[in-house]
Image (cartoon, rainbow, N blue to C red):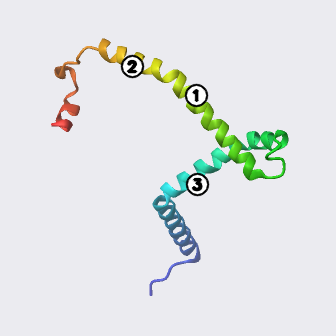
Amino acid sequence: MFSLDDRTGNVLTTVTIFSLAAAILYSARGSLFILLLSLFFAHLLEPAVVLVQRHSRLACKNRGWAVAQVYLIGTLLVAGLVYGLGPRVAAQMKNLISAVPAFPVERLPQVWCAATA
């Protein structure tokens, strides 16, 4: 009669459990990535929220108002950077595009040409 010993059973159980865990993590990788990204972003914003919560009259007892103020300040900073640097970056990109000559197709690798054909 065929039977497995205890060690083989333990190894098979462990491999099965880890395989199932890997399959679950793989299928949920998109949601887990968003979760990890949001945790990282919250960790980065924590010092700014605490600072605003300490020094703001509006958010002295309410953390939600402090978070809203940090988001508002961050949005205004990003908008100011885009407004200030946007035209310069666009002009430099236009100069770069006009300065780059047309690249001859004969110089492209054969693998890439075959994949696009």
Q: Position of residue 2 (x, y in %)?
A: 45, 84
The one of 53 and 47 positioned closer to us in this rendering: 53
User: What element does badge 1 sit on?
Assistant: helix
Looking at the rendered structure, the kind of residue marked 2 is: Met
The residue drawn where x is 25% and y is 14% is: 101
Earlier residue among tags 3 and 1: 3
Q: Nearer the viewer, mark 3 or mark 1?
A: 1
Residue with the mark numbered 3:
35
Looking at the rendered structure, the kind of residue marked 1 is: Gly
**How far separated are the C-alphas under marks 3 and 1?**
29 Å
User: What element does badge 2 sit on?
Assistant: helix
The residue drawn where x is 44% and y is 87% is: 1
**How far separated are the C-alphas under marks 3 and 2?**
35 Å
In the drawing, does residue 63 fall left or right of residue 100? right
Local crowd at mark 3 within 10 Å, few (<14), some, or many (≥20)? few
Quarter of the figure that contains the C terminus: top left
Query: Looking at the image, is 101 positioned above or below residue 82?
Result: above
Earlier residue among tags 3 and 2: 3
User: What element does badge 3 sit on?
Assistant: helix
Residue with the mark numbered 2:
93
**How far separated are the C-alphas under marks 1 and 2?**
20 Å
Asked if the residues shown at circle 3 and circle 1 are in contact, with their CB atoms under 8 angstroms apart, the answer is no
Q: Position of residue 29 (x, y in %)?
A: 49, 56
Numbered disc total? 3
